[in-house]
Amino acid sequence: MSGGTDAVQLSVVVPVHNERDNVAPLFFEIMAAMRSTAIDYEVIFVDDASNDDTLQVLRSLKREHPWLRVIRHLQRAGQSTALRNGVKAARAVWVVTLDGDGQNDPADIVTLLTARDEASATMGLFAGWRSRRHDHAIRRLSSKIANATRSAALGDATPDTGCGLKLFQRAVFLDLPYFSHMHRFLPALFQRAGFQVQSVAVSHRPRTGGVSKYGIWDRLWVGLVDIAGVMWLRRRSSMAEVIEE
């Protein structure tokens, strides 16, 4: 953890909505995971207008740990907006994100950091890959269909874009086209920006509290419009190498 702006080397951004039972355990797991590193970090929870007492739990945590940062939406805006606002508030060059439902293991933050340290500078996104899912059958099926549909249309060579665990540079992320549900298309958007994407195997855990916010309709039918939009963006992109004389 860090109290100074210049010292922060990693920002951990967690968007949440109605996750009262998960935010405290997740926060302490993040701290435990980061103890194994020599990195100065910050944790930012973005509360997307929860209507349970998620915000009250976060405020209680902040009283005990004043360095914790809590951002809240006055109206619900969705995961992509919560993610973007958390990244905008981040103070570090590098940002790692994870879902607030506790199914991502914070220990895998170190896994992503290790992959980054071993990669070339052309690698812009390190995306978690949940090779063994611990969800109910309907959610696994909806994710499988959505991933297959997206991969066939965009050719992003990424097996799992829905995993919340991702590591990237703040400035690159904020330069990407922004739209609702963009968090599901980050590999294709990073590739459009001229970067490579590395999928990194991470663990996945059963949900122990709260309820899932998504179903098969969110992952497929709503996503079809977004896929068409990303395809349009990729066709209209133009990249050029730049050298300053």
Image: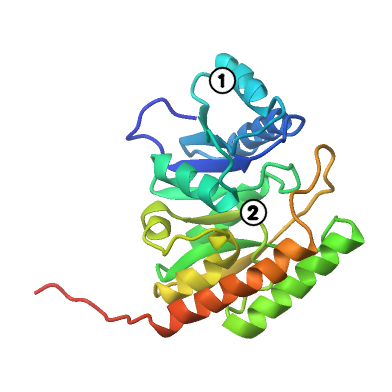
Q: Which mark is residue 97?
A: none
- For label 1, count other residues whose C-alpha is less than 10 Å away and answer few (under 14), some (14-19) or many (20+): some
- Out of 13 and 131, give the one closest to the viewer: 13
Instruction: Answer with mark 2 or mark 1, whichever residue precedes in sequence.
Output: 1
Q: Residue 193 at x, y = what percent?
A: 40, 72
* Mark 2 residue type: Gly
- Give the vertical position of 212 relative to 27 (above or below): below
Left or right side of 244 for 77: right
- Out of 9 and 160, give the one closest to the viewer: 160
Instruction: Find the residue positioned furthest to the right.
Output: 137
Callout 2: helix, strand or loop? loop
Screen quadrant of the C terminus: bottom left
Residue at which label 1 appears: 62
Q: Residue 128 at x, y = what percent?
A: 65, 60
* Mark 1 residue type: Lys
Q: CA distance from mark 2 to mark 1?
A: 23 Å
- Give the vertical position of 53 relative to 213 (above or below): above
Residue at which label 2 appears: 164
- Out of 87 and 125, give the one closest to the viewer: 87
Q: Residue at x 43, y 72 (%)?
A: 195
> Is residue 160 visible from the viewing direction of this image?
no
Q: How many marks?
A: 2
Left or right side of 222 for 40: left
State the colouring used for the structure image: rainbow
